[in-house]
Amino acid sequence: MLRKKTLEDIDLKGKRALVRVDYNVPLNGEGNITDDTRIRATLPTINYILDSGGSVILISHLGRPKGKSVPSMSLAPIVRRLSRLLRLEVLFLSDCVGDGVRQTLEGLQPGAVVLLENLRFHSGEIENDPDFSRQLASLADVYVDDAFATSHREHASVVGVPAILKPAVAGFLMQKEIDYFNMAFTEPVRPLVAILGGAKVSDKIKTIMSLMEKVDKIIIGGGMAFTFLKALGYRVGKSLVEEDMLELAADIMGEARLKGIPFYLPVDCIAANAIEKKAQTTVVPAQEIPEDKMGLDIGPATVTLFNEVLNLAKTIVWNGPMGVFELPPFSKGTFSIVETLANSQALTILGGGDTDVAVHATGNSDKIDYISTGGGAFLLFLEKGELPGINALDDA
Ligand code: AMP
């Protein structure tokens, strides 16, 4: 069981907390925030520290400025939104390290919230430079990580700082990710079913292999299913296939058979000549997709099959869409899986950017037990069962 110290395990009275958040929010050209979900997600941690008599110093990255100060990637636009959400004035400092920053923060009073400028304006962040970590660590009395989505990266603010600044604890958002991971994989209520989709096998191959050690059944949909189908000798037409993954795909299915893990693939699909909104579609068996067509969504028989498997599950973990769900002709498969999870009695956990988008698009977010805030981090967490940023925190 993965157990890390949390905010509730430490004394925050009169303490300055350096809180690593993920404010890598989408901004439009004029610097307006188009989606503030990531900011809202950190409010419980910030409010708890303030209510406990501490002060908060927020650090984050935004975009990829490559170690240089890039005005369009400044965190400054976030201050106004954060102030409004917290109902208090948040101070913004135009750098994240340096004498000026340290002096300002030395006198920080309980109840204050400060946001520092983009960590990645310094190359030391991505390089995990010890000196940069020391400078950040010198700004506060405790370290709090609430940025699960970046915890797969060995960056200064993720692993370097918590190695120096103690105590180093999980914020509430991070804690939730760890709790749900434990529920799904450490002590799952079985059967535990993993459903994976998305474009490429190569992106998720290691995750699939490691899930095989943990789950009772695996369902594969999306573009990556065609590499498996082709490995079985099926005619997949022009569907997305990674030729260099065919052997590995066959090995995985062989191993699933040996382990007695049912491995479900699409039995039919929605095929078309082109990935277009107005494409002519037909339902075809997965064994014989016409040569000039590609499979772009799971078909109705597959939806029924997958739903039957999911309906028998007690725990479901999902990553990756079942088809090109961004276009209406190919969205039904993904959306019907969302519906199934939304109405399921099982513990439902999903993660990965696109899966999240599909759930929001159907308005079913509230009916899923947990939607991870991580994309790459979520997949790597499934694969390894640990992440550098989580390992860096103090054990409970
Ligand atoms: P990923 O980031 O690996 O989860 O992949 C998500 C992307 O996979 C989405 O943008 C989908 O449009 C795409 N996708 C899903 N199914 C297919 C398919 N059958 N053919 C091509 N692309 C697909």
Image (spheres, grey):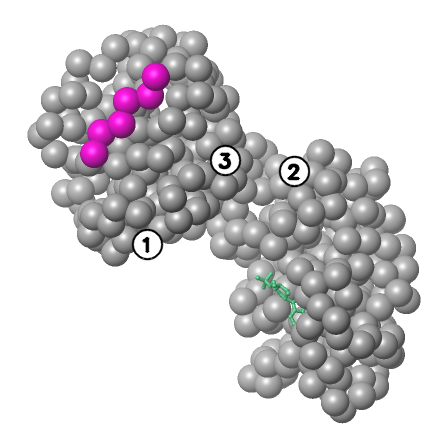
Image quadrant in which you'd find residue 76: top left
* Sequence-wise first label, 2 or 1: 1
Q: How far separated are the C-alphas under marks 3 and 1?
A: 19 Å
**Amino acid at circle 1:** Arg
In the displayed structure, would residue 343 be above or below residue 291?
above
Image quadrant in which you'd find residue 247: bottom right
| Residue found at the very far left of the displayed protein | 99
Badge 3 vs badge 2, beta-carbon distance below 8 Å: no
| Residue position for label 3 | 36
**Amino acid at circle 3:** Asp
Element type at mark 3: loop
Pick the residue in front: 250 or 238: 238
**Amino acid at circle 2:** Tyr
Residue 98 in percent (x, y) is at: 12, 34
Instruction: Answer few, some or many: residues within 10 Å of disc 2's Cα (few below 14, many 20 plus, some between 14 and 19).
Output: some
Check the picture and name the quadrant holding the N terminus.
top right
Magenta stretch in the rendered image: 89-94
| Residue position for label 1 | 64
The answer to whether mark 3 is within 8 Å of ligand 1 is no
Q: Which residue is drawn at 65% across and 38% down?
A: 370
Task: In the rendered structure, find residue 370 and report the number of the disc placed on it.
Answer: 2
Residue 204 in percent (x, y) is at: 57, 65
Quarter holding ligand 1 = bottom right
